[in-house]
Every structure is written in structure tokens, then in C-alpha cells.
Image (tube, rainbow, N blue to C red):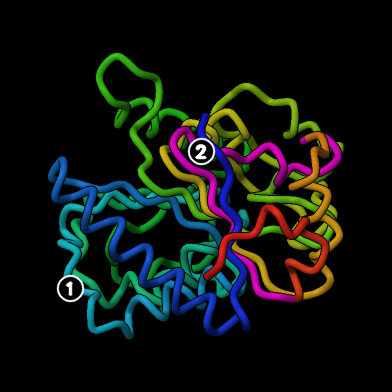
Amino acid sequence: MSGTHVVVHPSGQLLAEAAAARLLARLADVQAARGVASLVLAGGGVVIQSLAAMKASPARDAVDWSRVDVWWSDERFLVSGDPQRNETQARRALLDAVALNPDRIHPMPAAVSSMPDAEGTLGTAPHNSSADDGAAAYRDELARQATPGKQLPQFDVLLLGVGPEGHTASIFPESPAVHEQRPVVAVHRCPKPPPTRITMTLPTICSAEEVWLLAVGEPKAAAIGMALSGAGEAQIPAAGARGQLRTLWLLDRAAAAEVPAQLRTPW
């Protein structure tokens, strides 16, 4: 795997705008090289803010959105349309505003609702009675879409947030998910609500060409400093998230407060 790059921005707003510009350029470059691009989305305030900045960008249509595959790194196991679902937030921030191909959208399964579904929308998440069944279904979907000769699809850019204790996706410190080798697993009794989730595991995350970790705020500074100073992934799961070609940390000044100065790249 290649080196790690840390870019520190003056504020969360500038970080989101810069991340949006970087991501639009990266997707357009990948499409120019091989025709299609694959993006893995995450939840979290700054990630969703970056998606909204993409929607507002005059460069948005430099990407042929009909040739973008969209996946999710993790999801809250709630009913479709719940405002806490990463899928719902991503739709509102960006996805509903661009011309995506429904066959290329891969939401993680949702919990079964007792209410009838609304009119079907782009890439509507399938329903499962349990998070374990949902995780198995997403493993099957990954396998169906896998690059020939491989077990997983190609992921060009995989976005992640970082929690104040160092979690990323829905992989929490010292949790069973840290040690999982299966591509996707259910998470139960999560220390952060809601307690039941589905997540890609670190081996899947690390299969991506590029992994981008976005974080803002002083409460995350200690965990980020540890992640970039050699902490183990069991202690700080974000430390184990690395891309095959590049690992990019996009931080505001507060979140970067404990990052060694020699690791920082001028923004």
C-alpha cells in the first residue's frame, strides 16, 4: 500500500468544499481512464456536507453520474427513509439531484417496516428482518458485482468519517468487527445509537484504490493523532483504514491538533 497524506484545512466548511472539488475531479479522471467510476459513501456530518457541496458545485456535471457505481461503507439498520440512515442523508445531500443509473446504486438493506412503502425511488434499499440477514445480502451483492477474478468490486474512492474514540464506518474499538475477515457484518449493541448496524470490514475497506477519512472538531484530535502515530486498529479502528494507492486524511485545524507537523501536507 502507498503512503498516507494529511491535508489540514482552516475550517470544516472549507474542508467540505475542497473534498467536493477533489472528489469530482477524481471521479471524472477515473471515468476518463476506464469509463466508469465507483464510490463508497459514509455517514457523518462532514461527509454529508461534502456531498452537498458537490451538488452545489458548478463542476458537478463534469462527472457522468449514469456511470458511477455507489456503495455504502456502513448503515444504520433502520427502516427505509429514516432520517438517521446514511442512505437517506446522502439522497438529500446529492444523490436525488444527479442522474444516477438505478442498477448502479447499492444501498445497504433496511429494517422491515410495518408501514407500506412509498412509491419506489432510485436504488431503493431491500428489506431484511435482521441485520445479520442484511449483512449476508450485502455480501452477496458485492460478490455479484465483483471484478472478474476477484471477490469484491473495484472501489475507486471510499469515504469514511472518524469518531472521537477512533471508530470508522461502524467498526468500534475492541469490537468483534475489528477482527472480522468477512466483507460485511452486522454490528449489535453498538456503543453509539442506533445500536444495530451493518458495516464493511477493514479488509473490504482496504481493498479500495483510495481511502479518504474526513473529520472535523477538537473531540476527534486525540484519536486522529493516535491513528497517525502508529496505534493499532483494535484500539483505533481508523488506523487500519488504508487505500491500495492512497490514504488521504482531510481534517480541519481542530481535528488535526495532535497530528505530527511533519505528516501534514499544505492545503
Q: Work out whether residue 239 can be spotted.
A: yes
Amino acid at dot 2: Gly
Near mark 2 (Cα within 10 A), the count class, few <14, some 14-19 or many ≥20, is: many
Q: Work out whether residue 75 can be spotted.
A: no
Circle 1 sits in a helix, a strand or a loop, which is it? helix
Near mark 1 (Cα within 10 A), the count class, few <14, some 14-19 or many ≥20, is: some
Q: Position of residue 236 (x, y in %)?
A: 80, 44
Above or below residue 182? Residue 192 is: below
Above or below residue 133? Residue 21 is: below
Inter-mark Cα distance, 1 to 2: 26 Å
Residue occupied by mark 2? 243
Which residue is at 16% across, 58% downward?
Answer: 66
99 falls in the magenta region: no
Which residue is at 86% across, 60% downward?
Answer: 222
In the image, taking residue 223 as reference, residue 143 lies left or right, namely left
Query: Of circles 1 and 2, which is in front?
Result: 2
Q: Position of residue 228 (x, y in %)?
A: 74, 47
Residue occupied by mark 1? 61
Q: Position of residue 136 (x, y in %)?
A: 52, 30
